[in-house]
Image (cartoon, rainbow, N blue to C red):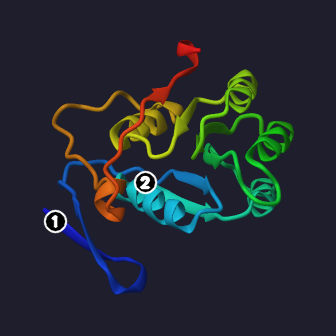
Amino acid sequence: MIALSQIENGAITQMRVTPTENRSSEIVCLVDDDPLVLRSTGLLLVSDGFAVRRFDKGEDFITYVASHDVPLVVLDIWMEGMTGLEVLARLCAISPQTHVIVITGREDGAARLTAMQIGTVAFLIKPFDDEQFLELVHRALGHPPESPSRKPPLSAPDLVGNSHRTKVQYPAEL
């Protein structure tokens, strides 16, 4: 079955949904000051059944998390205003149960080490592999491993025309 949904600016996106699939309605927060990353990564998460709450400023996310339960946030490190590391420090104080996947456009060993020591799920360099990213999201939320029969979601490179792949860094690989 193909479901069509209306997306920003009238564009139409197709998502493969089988009647027996149990689509997740869990909220994943996405914090990045790059509108293209917010849109493409948000669409990738939506295509896999997640409700996505997007924030282009760390301050706005901190305000939101102070009054909402947030199981997972995908957080950019290098943002204008409040950096991702500052957001991470505040998040640990107000919502220690929130899982964090860090994304960044540049390699920074000190930022990686700090983020991993705080206890993030993973540290990814943009652009990252969509399937590995979604697997990390599911793992962070305690979902069982992906079944081989599950239909693939839309990929961010398909949505934005970027096909570069970068290795995901897991805490055990440090």
Determine the residue positioned at 24% across, 31% down: 147
Q: Earlier in the sequence, mark 2 or mark 1?
A: 1
Q: Residues within 10 Å of mark 1 (few under 14, many from 20)?
A: few
Position in image of residue 120 (x %, y %): 65, 30
Secondary structure state at the residue bearing disc 2? helix
Determine the residue positioned at 57% across, 46% down: 105
Q: Is residue 44 above or below residue 146?
A: below
Horizontal side of residue 89 vs 45, given as left or right: right
The residue that label 2 is drawn on is 45
The residue that label 1 is drawn on is 2
Kind of residue indicated by mark 2 = Leu
Horizontal side of residue 162 vs 68, given as left or right: left
Position in image of residue 46 (x %, y %): 41, 59
Determine the residue positioned at 76% across, 57% down: 58
Horizontal side of residue 36 vs 1, given as left or right: right
Q: Is residue 49 above or below residue 145?
A: below
Kind of residue indicated by mark 1 = Ile
